[in-house]
Image (cartoon, helix red, strand yellow):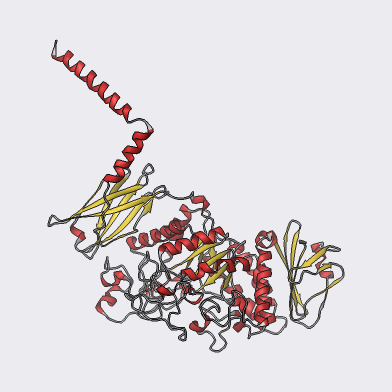
Amino acid sequence: MSIFNKMKNLVFIVSIFVVTFCSAFNNNPSEKFKKKMTSESFKAFNEIERVEPSNWWVGFKNQALQLLVKEDNVYSANIDISYQGVTIESIVKGTSPNYLFINLKISESTKPGKFNMTFTFDNGEKKIQTYELKARTKPAEDYIGFNSSDAIYLITPDRFSNGDESIDVISYLKEKTINRQDDYARHGGDIKGIINHLDYIHDMGFTAIWPCPLLTNDMPSTSYHGYAMTDFYQVDPRFGTLDAYKELADKSRELGIKLVMDQVVNHCGSEHWWMKDLPFSDWVNQQKSFENQTQLKNSNHRRTSNQDTYASEKDKHDMSEGWFVSAMPDLNQQNPYMATYLIQNSIWWVETLGLGGIRQDTYPYSDKTFLSEWAGAIMNEYPNFSIVGEEWSYNPLIVGYWQDGMNNKDGYKSNLKSPMDFPMQQQIVNALNEDEQWDTGFVKMYEGLANDFHYASAKDLMIFPDNHDMSRIFTQLHQNIDKTKMALGYIFTLPRITQFYYGTEILMSDAANPGDHGLIRTDFPGGWKGDMVNAFTGEGLSDAQKDMQLFVKKLLNYRKNSKAIHEGKTIHFAPEHGVYVLFRIFEDETVVVILNKTSESILNLSRFNELRLNSKKLRNILNEKVITWEDSIQINPDGITIFTTIMK
């Protein structure tokens, strides 16, 4: 037999063996066996000091992933990754020898799983770090953000409820005490405390919660507020764990409550772990001054320099690159690795918690080109998501500039769905505090709402009576209960997203020292063992507090299902004789909001004929009385009256 024929026979025999062998493993039990073998043979390692983000997911539109690697002298290491669908695009060394930035591509076909990254150092030492790519738990389109149907309950977690006393003090953190008698100390509120009272929040009619930041603030003092973060990927252990945060998200979802995360891309806390060894020479603004311990400049806070066509370059520079305060280093988002780090961090939290929105702190202080890219990257991955940005300006032109869809003269596209409506909040307070004249009083609300023509989408603005940084609305209105009800009732029925600060429903006040942040953020009564007053149950509340709580509860529970308030047409009539009337209309539902600063209790209806409500029955949402819309109706003197055409 020729060598050629022998080779043919050998190939034939080998082929039969291979086919037979493969067929033997082509049934389900063998597949399970192979998977089991693969699982058991994979060994996980954790030998690198820090890799961020700590995990990622397959299936994003953006296939790029940047890994920040922190390890002594890692800059000289060679890196090997062997996982199907994952390729190293580039490796960038930091200015510090202890950092590498690994740029990966996660292909569309990549499967979820774990893989090892091997770091080989100059001295021959090898270190291995296991990394996981997870499967996404739901489609990107199912991450539904807050909208005008939502009423968001804003909470300062340290001051709401202490659900786990065992974590009040963490020995390895710098601030080691709690003291409820000190308005600026930690008081012990935590994530478990919020979870314990989700039923209260739901029953009050709220559809979303926004806790102030829950990430680690390992600062020596005044760390309770959460805005000086020292680790962007770690839950502050005095608030709980990542699992507790996930539990809060899950249990909120079960009640139809969205979770909004308070994030900060403008700055970190001065005790952030990287401040002791910064990755690049331009990781934070004014870095040279910080490292040389020379004088640092705070921001000039001239936020209009973002829009001002006449603004000097110095003003723009001092605004965006000055530190917010001396304890909060200003992050340099013009460094592309910092920018990517912050974008990925936001996406990591959206995916990890299944968020229903992000609130971005100190919005106009960051580099505005970065802000557009940051918001755009999130909205690109989650098209139905929502982000609200804090621009504390009373000028609607400034606020409108930041909203997506605005045709700005400088061509700026923000990608931000929801700015905060500080202009309207101010007009409401002014209107209610002023006497009624041609150009004072209710006309401020009337003309303030008229500014909606300027906005790309007024219904996506977020309105609020007060928040964690300003005096309580009850204080702003000189502790006048009727005016406070008028403010709340009007806010709840506007074409807006509503935000409401915890405790406003029980008339919390900072009148003893107006504007004092520690006092504004008073403990919610009943959130601590031994509290003599319990606002969750009503025990110990005054009649006025119970009445306000019920007022809020009735209106918000009506609002929860009101299409007229969520998406209806708005018609309002110029104030006349101390009375201002607003209508919200959707199909057969009309909501009538009547604000009255006079002692008169009869309202003539002749000038509202265009609403075509004649002879219709309307129900008073607050007292359930039914009236007929004829020549005149009875209304509350010095107060608010709200009717609906929807009968129970």
Residue 64 screen position, x and y as percent: 35, 51
Q: Is residue 192 left or right of residue 50?
A: right
Camera-side residue of 49 and 427: 49
Q: Quadrant of the N terminus?
A: top left
Residue visible at 37% across and 53% down?
A: 56
Position of 307 relative to 110 (above/below)? below
Q: Quadrant of the C terminus?
A: bottom right
Q: Is residue 409 visible?
A: no
Q: In the depicted view, which residue is nearer to us: 508 or 265?
A: 508
Residue 593, position as x, y percentages in the image: 73, 70
Q: In the orientation shown, which residue stands out farthest toward the bottom?
A: 512
Q: Residue at x 51, y 64 (%)?
A: 260
Q: Is residue 647 left or right of residue 144?
A: right
Residue at 66 percent of width and 65 percent of height? 557
The answer to whether 256 appears left or right of 127 in the picture is right
Q: Residue 462 location, x and y as percent?
A: 57, 67
Residue 371 placement: quadrant: bottom left
In the rendered view, would you say 472 is above or below 453? below
| Residue 297 occupies quadrant | bottom left
How far across and how far down the image is residue 206, in percent? 60, 66
Residue found at the far left of this picture: 123
Tell me the residue at 16%/56% (across/down): 121
Corner quadrant of residue 549: bottom right
